[in-house]
Amino acid sequence: MLSRDTFSYTVQARCSRADALALLGDLTRQGELHPLVVAVRRVPPRPGALASYAITDRLAVGPLRFPVTYQADVLIATEDEVVTVARQWPATTVRNHTRFKDEPAGVVRIDVEITLSAPAPLFGYAFRQARAAHLGLATRLGAALERGPDAAS
């Protein structure tokens, strides 16, 4: 049986939509932003994907740290939104829907909705890890975008 839940956050940054899209639509550029990511490797795009990646995170269980590699696909990347889906065994999926909106004074509003589904016994741990990691990314995102397009590469 799968469990599912969603969380969201908003970041505002003085940057262009193009810079926000370039950073959030290319997962190789997020290694410095995402607190769990230790390696990102681009792989040939899977069917229906604009780009595909093999991503390795370092997860913690108590004092132990262990690497987990999963696949992630960019499904949509436009000036208005980015949609990615990450899949990890067993049956764990993280869908990230990011929307961009221009605000006054050259600010871009970035609204992110993360939906995680996982087998019920793993769900609590997976959801807590995903939420903490993505909120950690959120705290770094605005500053990285304001530093410029090469800040997180």
Image: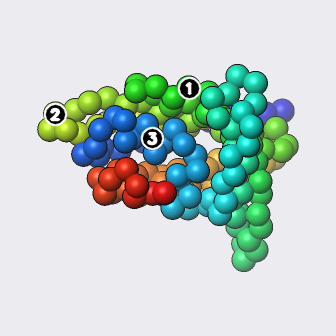
Mark number displayed over residue 22: 3
Residue at the outermost bottom position = 63
Image position, residue 95 (x, y; %) = 62, 34
Along the viewing direction, whichever of 133 and 86 lies nearer the viewer: 86
Q: Residues within 10 Å of mark 2 (few under 14, many from 20)?
A: few
Sequence order check: which comes first, mark 3 or mark 1?
3
Location of the N terminus (image quadrant): top right
Residue 11 image-quadrant placement? top left
Which label was assigned to residue 104? Answer: 2
- What amino acid type should be assigned to the residue bearing mark 3? Ala
Q: CA distance from mark 1 to mark 2?
A: 26 Å
Q: Residue at x 37, y 31 (%)?
A: 100
Instruction: Give residue 76's mark.
Output: 1
The answer to which image quadrant residue 14 occupies is: top left
Q: Is residue 13 left or right of residue 26?
A: left
Residue 59 higher or lower than 22, as above or below: below
Q: Could you tell me the amino acid type at mark 1?
A: Ile
> Colour scheme in the image?
rainbow
Q: Secondary structure at mark 2?
A: helix
Task: In the rendered view, tell whether residue 140 sits above or below residue 23.
Answer: below
Res. 7 in view: no
